[in-house]
Amino acid sequence: MSSQKKVRVRFAPSPTGGLHLGGVRTALFNYLFAKQHGGEFILRIEDTDQTRFVPGAEEYINECLAWCGILPDESPSNPGAFGPYRQSERKPSYRQYAEQLIAAGHAYYAFDTSEELDALRQSQPNFRYAQENRMSLRNSLSLSAEETQRLLDANAPHTIRIKMPEDHIVSFDDMIRGRVSFETKLVDDKVLLKADGMPTYHLAVVVDDKAMEISHVFRGEEWLPSAPVHLLLWEYLGWSDDMPQWAHLPLILKPDGNGKLSKRDGDRLGFPVYAMNWTDAKTGDLTKGFRELGFLPEAFVNMLGVLGWNDGTEQEIFTLSELVEKFSVERINKSGAKFDFEKAKWFNHEWIKKMDNTALLPLVREGLVQHGVSAIEDSSITTILSVVKERMTYVSDFWAQASFFFQMPQHYDVDAVKPKWNADKTKFFEEILVEFEDQDWQASVLEPFFKERVQSSGMKIGELMMPFRIMLVGGKFGPDVFLIAEILGKDQVINRVNVALDVFNS
Ligand code: GLU
């Protein structure tokens, strides 16, 4: 690749279902690299495998990137000059390249039917279509030129396969792993063009990366074994000078044990693996996502950004623009990153604390509406947020932490109060209620006032603070009780104390 080439990277998911967090991380690293270099981030939908196509998956991908704030500069819904951005729509462009490869002796027609190949796979468990057996199969290498022509003229169904060279080493410099080499004899003769005329991923990815002038490819490590096929195709098509630079991202590993983190690990260990909820249209099965669990996109992106990358300091909290600024391929770890859900939660908690209350407001209001609370002023919500956000891991925790601001306690933790409840305490609250009437209603006034009254009663502060909290909140939780009292307002506090006194004394 010439170093002057404009940076153009692509995220190339197949629309087969919800987006795994590893997929989003791939998108993110592409985005960060593009933006850092003033380049373009492209979304290309790789839908050539029509059998795996799932309706709604492309919309989901769009929504997911938008949620994360990593918007493509070019995509199917926002095309640039390099369209179409869906591989299926590029179908007519591929055959010529497959034919070109055949003409140059790097590919061949294969007439074996899928039934024949299935039978071979049945009888030979390690069957692969490759150099050791290609001459005994039905293809244009093993058949005569006349027979091949006859079959083609008769429109006999066929695929086109790459002819892997026999004893060749294919090497390249991966931006993350350095020099990588492959022995071509270990790689099978992959199908390039299917019987339906659709290219396979291998052909399409090369043709499209060339046509879209892709400069760098950041993709998951699971594609590394395919790299020798892609490299040879770049060479055989005469495009070596335009080949992008490769960066194979290490896997995201399961928290326990080895291996790639899968959706099943999430189900098993009770955390999401998809970015957003995904419902399988056929089965109706719902796979939960980070968004719906109450993750902020900022936290999700931050967590993914540092999964296998760091900036060399202790810093862990990064905004998207900081990641753009600080991202460096050299600091991507070469080994897989174990996914740690507790750490993911920590990121969300930190982001909730850091986030401006007005930015959290719409998310929190959505949750309130679900609980039937709608007539609340924005300013009340932001005030409440400022006192409870320290206690929230998810946006959806707002209700659990703050419902008592919007409604009377539904239950009282009487077990915590009753064993030590007595007439003196009742009297204390009855008297203080009267005095509350004349107080300036601020936490900074209420706290010294309450403490002073406790002291003159001869009782201990904890003996009265805890019941006071339970009167207002229902349980032994929540932020500072005087802040709660201030926010609830005088009338509400007086009412709640009265109601609770009845409960405690009944
Ligand atoms: N379509 C491939 C996928 O679903 C893309 C691999 C690549 O980026 O080359 O991940």
Image (cartoon, rainbow, N blue to C red):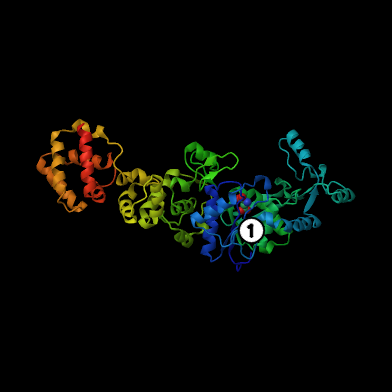
Which residue is pictured at 78% across the width and 39% down the height?
A: 116
Q: Is residue 226 above or below residue 327?
A: above
Instruction: Locate the C terminus by quadrant.
Output: top left
Q: Image check: 455 left or right of 240?
A: left
Horizontal and vertical percent position of residue 166: 75, 49
Circle 1: residue type: Tyr
Which residue is pictured at 70% across the width and 54% down the height?
A: 203
Instruction: Locate the N terminus by quadrant.
Output: bottom right
- Residue 280 seen in the current view: yes
Q: Image check: 97 left or right of 320?
A: right
Q: Image check: 446 left or right of 72?
A: left
Foreground pick, 166 / 293 = 293
Horizontal and vertical percent position of residue 324: 48, 61
Q: How many marks?
A: 1
Foreground pick, 432 / 291 = 432
Q: Which residue ends up furthest to the front in the rendered image?
A: 375
Horizontal and vertical percent position of residue 377: 33, 54
Residue that numbered label 1 is attached to: 85
SS label for mark 1: loop
Q: Quadrant of the rendered structure where residue 215 is?
A: bottom right
Foreground pick, 361 / 374 = 374
Horizontal and vertical percent position of residue 390: 33, 49
- Residue 335 seen in the current view: no
Q: Image check: 424 left or right of 154?
A: left
Is the residue indicated by label 1 positioned so its CB lies within 8 Å of ligand 1?
Answer: no
